[in-house]
Amino acid sequence: DSGVTQTPKHLITATGQRVTLRCSPRSGDLSVYWYQQSLDQGLQFLIQYYNGEERAKGNILERFSAQQFPDLHSELNLSSLELGDSALYFCASSARGGYTFGSGTRLTVV
Amino acid sequence: GENVEQHPSTLSVQEGDSAVIKCTYSDSASNYFPWYKQELGKRPQLIIDIRSNVGEKKDQRIAVTLNKTAKHFSLHITETQPEDSAVYFCAASKGGADGLTFGKGTHLIIQP
């Protein structure tokens, strides 16, 4: 157990739908990062939150949004889903530079 | 922003041989360089890291070297074993609340 908790582990949904992925960082970590990993692809950075505020944005689509709550857990909202959004979504938290990744949410859009 | 290039994209070595994966970075302010190992369908896991105030770090069969002048760093795995087969990612960061910039990954295949 890495200390970073992601739920759900698996999600199957239809095109056009909306889903929410949840991440709880390690105790004491203020930063949360979201990454998308498609089949045979690297880690595509989506967005970072630091202590409740958006810190950096990567290749995040307008259909996607995220937030970090006062208790530091974060949610990634994916809407108007397309087949190409099928991927593993990881969140990571960090303290002094190094990331600890959660186990990921495998999203399948059918 | 930071850009990290990683080579090769695929590396096949005989069991027992050594493997070397190389990365270059663009931002001279980067000072933290971790390496992650990711097995199929699993989360990336930190295997070793190095900060810019040292040139080399070793942990059993794994070592990382850093050349700040040339802005490149490398992962060395000696006496490779079948369980070393995985995708390896290098990354760079300026530290603090700044995030990591990852390379595109190297698929390491250990041939029996």
Image (spheres, coloured by chain):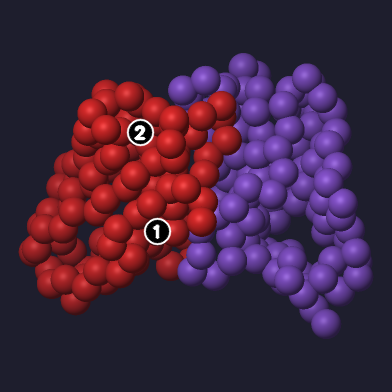
Chain colours: A red, B purple
Q: Residue placed at 23% from the left, 44% from the top?
A: A75
**Which secondary structure, mark 1?**
loop
Q: How far apart are marks 2 and 1 (CA)?
A: 16 Å
Residue A89 found in image quarter = bottom left
Question: Given the image, what chain letter belongs to the residue carrying mark 2?
Answer: A
Circle nearer the N terminus (2, 1): 2
Residue B50 found in image quarter = top right
**In the image, is residue B33 above or below residue B22?**
above
Report if residue B6 is visible in the image.
no
Report if residue A17 is visible in the image.
yes
Residue A61 is labelled as none
**In the image, is residue A31 above or below residue A26?**
above
**Which secondary structure, mark 2?**
strand
Q: Position of residue A84 (x, y in %)?
A: 26, 64
Q: Residue placed at 43% from the left, 36% from the top?
A: A27
Q: Position of residue A3 (x, y in %)?
A: 47, 48
Mark 1, other Cα within 10 Å: few <14 / some 14–19 / many ≥20: many
